[in-house]
Every structure is written in structure tokens, then in C-alpha cells.
Image (tube, helix red, strand yellow):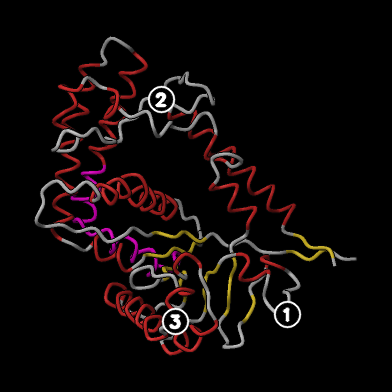
Amino acid sequence: MKNIKGYVSFVLHAHLPFVYHPESEDYLEEQWLFEAISETYIPLLLNFKKLEEEHVDFRITMSLTPPLLSMLDNELLQKRYIKYLKTHIELCEKEVVRTAYDERLNKLSHYYLERYTNDLHVFKDVYNCNLINGFKHFQDIGVLEIITCGATHGYFPILYVNENTIRAQIAVGVQTYEKYFGRRPRGIWLPECGYVPQADKYLREFGIEYILTESHGILYADPTPLYGTFAPIVSPGGIVAFGRDIESSKQVWSSIIGYPGDFNYREYYRDIGFEADYDYIKPYIASNGVRVHTGIKYYRITSKSDFKDYYNPRWAMDTAERQARSFLRFKSCTNKLSI
């Protein structure tokens, strides 16, 4: 028996359904994009920039799907995101006044005011409303590899009843990538990680060298891979396939057995959009009067009971750092196979 190291690559999948309604000033689903920009894409860019400034030679792979790229490049959606931020800043300023009676709550209202104000500065002044170029910079300096996805995130195992549909999904994915990044992608995150062998010839046609697929796409391959998901395999068509590692995914994804359910993290469902006095919050929810999330959440998960304590950003950051160290220790122990 001998131990052989396996490997784990960090691959982020950035995707949102395409939502664009110029005919409406208040289309609720557009907020999916605005929330993602503030909660995910800007924080990623800021952290990449911090690593660059600290001369950390990091490596990460990330997909940017055609629907997401098209929305990030849309001038009207960019203007609406700025309007979204200004509205949130106005609400936060009111929250600073309203919560003056409680020191902890008031500190959190200042926290959100600073966050949304900084988002507006970063989006307008740092990136000139173009986050795509922000990500392109990190690819150009060699620390980020951006990969593509299917044109509409269409699921290949269903679409292959008409193979031309799969070819179109790949073709548009590659063309969209070339439009924004000036070269062809080497890899593709298969939509919903669904693989079919019939896609190989089209992946090769458009220069795709590797794919990201679901774990069972690797584990149930024939012949069964010796190293499971801890090493890539090569399809009969010559495409290198990386599979998602089940245990790693659970740790970073599951709110039940993974890190996201930690009691120090924000409670997503306790939002002032649903809890503040209706007349007070009405200008900041849906135009038809329906309560919606505002992104201002004052509570942490705390426990599985109905009692929730106030959110503490410092505790959340400390928890994230502790879990990151735990993840690295866990992977260093589990990514070894005995044969």
C-alpha cells in the first residue's frame, strides 16, 4: 500500500439567468444581478486586487457565463445598478437615524451605509461601470483563468436529442468569450455540470481543452478512474474532464452540514424589507407594494430557533478565516489515496 496525493482546484461558477426588461422601470428579477454584483462580483475583484497588491501569487479559475457577461455589459442595467445603489444609500442614511437608540444596531446601519457607498465608488470610479474588464485584468496578469459556459446554460443531456443545439450552445459560449476577452477559452463549465459524449466533437471543434462536470460523470466512467475525482480523466474524444469533489462541495455549499450554516453568518431571511414599518419601507420595496429583500440584514443565524442575535461582521470574518484553515487541513488529510 502506498499513499498518492490527490489535488483540489478552486473553480468558481459565476452565472445568472438573463434578465433584461427595458419596458419596465421596476422589474424585480433584475435585482438578482444587482445583489450578485454587490454581494459577490465586487467583493471578488476587491479581494483579487488585495492579493495583487500584497504580491500573493495566487491561482484561481472562474467561469463567466454568456448570460452574465451580456448583462454586465448592458448599459441600461449598469445605470439601473447605480440607481439601485443610490436608493440603498438613501435607505441606509435613514437607518442610521432610525437605529440611533441601539448602539449595536446603529453600528450595523453604518456598516451597510459604508458598504453600498463603497460599491458605488468601486463600480463608477474604479471600474467605470465595466466589471468585465476588472476580471480580464487578472486573467491578463496570469492569476485568474476565466472559462466559459453554454450560451443559455442549457442542459446538454436534454439538448443532445438535437446535437446542433449542443453545438450552438458551445459556439455562442466561445464567441461571447472571445468578444470580451480577446481569445478563445481553454475550458468550459458544462451547464449544470451535465456531460454527454456527443459533445466531445463540438468541444474540440471550438478549441475547448477541458470541462468541469459532475462527480458521477467521473466516478461512473468506464473504466472506473483509479483516483476518483482527485485527478482529471480524458474522454475518448480527447477532452480532459475534472469532476466536482462531493465532500468539498458539501463543506462550502451546504447550510446543514457545511460552513454556510455557521451561527455567526448573516441570517438571509431576516431583512428589513419584510420587518420594517410598512409606510417607512414602502419607497424601497417593489413598486406594487410587495415586500422584498433590501439586502439590509441585521441578524446572524445564531441558532436553529426563532431567536436571532445581531450580526457581527468581525465575528463572521473570524469564522471565515477559521473555516478556511480547517478546509486546508481537511483537504491535506483526505486528498490521499491508498492503493
Tell me which residue sits at (42%, 21%) in the image: 310
Whole-percent x, y for residue 197 in the image: 55, 82
Whole-percent x, y for residue 94 in the image: 18, 23
Give the distance between the C-alpha atoms of the residues marked 1 and 2, in whole angstroms: 50 Å
Give the distance between the C-alpha atoms of the residues marked 2 and 3, in whole angstroms: 48 Å
The answer to whether the residues at label 1 and label 2 have Cβ atoms under 8 Å apart is no
Query: Could you tell me what secondary structure mostly forms the magenta stretch?
Result: helix
Tell me which residue sits at (39%, 32%) in the image: 269
Image quadrant where residue 117 sits: top left
* Amino acid at circle 2: Tyr
Q: Name the element at disc 3.
A: loop
Left or right: where 177 falls relative to 287: right
Residue named by callout 2: 299
Residue named by callout 3: 161
Image quadrant where residue 111 sits: top left
Q: Name the element at disc 2.
A: loop
Q: Dot 3, how many residues are within 10 Å of its Cα: few (below 14), some (14-19), or many (20+)?
A: few
User: Which residue sits furthest front?
Assistant: 161
* Amino acid at circle 3: Val
Name the residue nearer the viewer: 125 or 336: 336
Name the residue nearer the viewer: 200 or 321: 200
Taking 180 as reference, is 270 above or below it?
above
Mark closest to the chain's N terminus, 2 or 3: 3
Mark closest to the chain's N terminus, 1 or 2: 1
Q: Name the element at disc 1.
A: loop
Taking 154 as reference, is 257 above or below it?
above
Name the residue nearer the viewer: 63 or 304: 304
* Amino acid at circle 1: Pro
Q: Residue 223 bears which disc, if any?
A: 1
Q: Dot 2, how many residues are within 10 Å of its Cα: few (below 14), some (14-19), or many (20+)?
A: many
Q: Nearer the viewer, mark 3 or mark 1?
A: 3
